[in-house]
Amino acid sequence: MASRRRMLLKVIILGDSGVGKTSLMNQYVNRKFSNQYKATIGADFLTKEVLFEDRIFTLQIWDTAGQERFQSLGVAFYRGADCCVLVYDVNVMKSFDNLNNWREEFLIQASPPDPENFPFVVLGNKIDVDGGNSRVVLPILPHYQIKIAKSVSVIIILKDRITNTEGQHKG
């Protein structure tokens, strides 16, 4: 069997406090969900290996604190990121309205070489809360809404990013 090439991709998860960033990461990497809320202090990361087109990609997924007091730590965590996932709670309009602030802050602190083409993924979370009756973000917006509480496998395929970064990383 031929050896597979490996590539590391750094993914940053951003959004307001309480939108479910940690739960998303834990469900995707460990397939575990907890109903207990525990605020992230600073940042944490997990890794997951993904096989795509006969290559192994190690996703280094960074979960960041959503509180403003920790935003100054961003530059240390955001540098070298290959993708940024912006998460909001579909039941809290302010969390959706704040996504542009998170995006701008990320671009300032990460200083990617091509900010206009840097890949962002927007995820609406908590669609299962209150049977969906509390939803305040319009369903006609072109975005993905996900729930993670019932072992729904959250799969983030960075196909375009993987294809475009092949020449930038040596594996």
Image: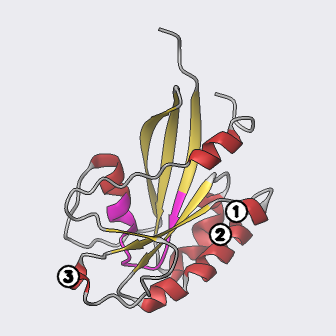
In the rendered structure, which amino acid carries the disc numbered 2?
Phe
Label 2 – label 3 distance at C-alpha: 33 Å
Q: Which residue is drawn at 35% across and 86% down?
A: 91
- The disc at residue 110 is 1
Q: What element carries label 1?
A: helix
Q: In this orientation, which residue lies closer to the viewer: 76 or 138?
A: 138
Q: In this orientation, which residue lies closer to the viewer: 137 or 22?
A: 137
The figure's colour scheme reads secondary structure
Task: Examine the image and state in which quarter residue 111 appears.
Answer: bottom right
**Is 143 drawn above or below residue 140 in the view shown?**
above
Pointer 2: what residue? 106
The image shows residue 44 at horizontal and vertical percentages of 44, 57
Reply yes or no: does residue 171 show up in magenta: no
Seen as rendered, the residue at the extreme right is 113
Q: Are marks 2 and 1 in contact (CB under 8 Å)?
A: yes
In the rendered structure, which amino acid carries the disc numbered 3?
Gly
Q: Is mark 3 on a helix, strand or loop?
A: helix
